Structures are given as C-alpha cells and as structure tokens.
Amino acid sequence: MTTLKGSCQCGAVQFQIEGDPKWIAHCHCLDCRRATGAAFSTYVGVEKENVKFPAGTPSIYSSSKGVKRSFCSDCGSPIAYQGERWPSEIHFFVGLFERAEDLVPQEQVYESEKLPWLHIVTEAPVA
C-alpha cells in the first residue's frame, strides 16, 4: 500500500494518506484561482477515511455554499478543498507532497475557465 506524506510550508500541519490517489487533476476554475492566487490549481483527490494529520490541524474556511477550504493558520499555506459534490473525498494541493514529482496529473477540469494565455506542457487530457 502506498503512503503519501506532506505538509504546509512551515510544517505545523502535516498529513499522511494511506493508499493511492483516486485522481490527480489541474483545476482552472475561478474559485480555485482566487483561493490560491495561481493561474490554476493541481489537486490530488483521496478518500477522507485514508487521511491522518499526525501534526497540527488545518483551519477551515467556508468559501462558498457546500465548499470548505483548509489552510495552515500559522503560515497561511492552502492545504485542501472539500465539497458537497464529493462528500467522501478531500482534495490536497499537489505542491504540499514530499514527492510531488511522482503525482502526475491525469486530467484538467473547468477548462472553459482556463486563462487564455495559459499553455500547460503536460500530457494531462482535457476532461
């Protein structure tokens, strides 16, 4: 079984996931861009039941109806996304993982909201 580990920038919030991700995807939606300040966000979707926080507890912000975004209250790093649409999942930002290079995106979502000047060099197909 795969074990994935990661943390926020300062290390106050650490997480561990037992098992493989359900999916890995780039999200181009406006809400995710605003939440991160980035041109797009790359998420690793996992089952909540497989997640442990061995150090720290992320703070939660309800960014819109049915959406919770977690972050480190010490350094401000965004940690994850949770939405009513996927009640059993939590979606972590790929950049937080110890071996992010091993977590290759498989698709792109909300591609219709992608910034027109953005050209991603990847093999991730558009969903």
Image: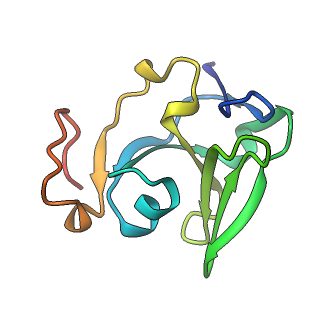
Q: Residue 106's x, y, as percent?
A: 31, 38
Query: What is the quadrant of residue 1 in the picture?
Result: top right
Give the side of residue 58 with respect to residue 45, left or right.
right
Which image quadrant: the C terminus? bottom left
Asked which colour scheme the image uses, the reply is rainbow
34 or 70: nearer the viewer: 34
Q: Residue 85's x, y, as percent?
A: 54, 70
Q: Residue 22's x, y, as percent?
A: 50, 41
116 or 88: nearer the viewer: 116
- The correct choice, above or below, for 7 with respect to 66 in the image is above
Measuring 72% from the left and 40% from the top, which residue is drawn there?
75
Measuring 84% from the left and 44% from the top, which residue is drawn there?
57
Query: What is the quadrant of residue 82 in the picture?
Result: bottom right
- In this view, the residue farthest toward the bottom is 65
Q: Residue 112's x, y, as percent?
A: 20, 67
Give the side of residue 43 with respect to residue 123, left or right.
right
47 or 116: nearer the viewer: 116
Give the side of residue 89 with respect to residue 15, left or right.
left
Count of marks overlaid on the render: 0
Measuring 13% from the left and 60% from the top, which residue is drawn there?
116
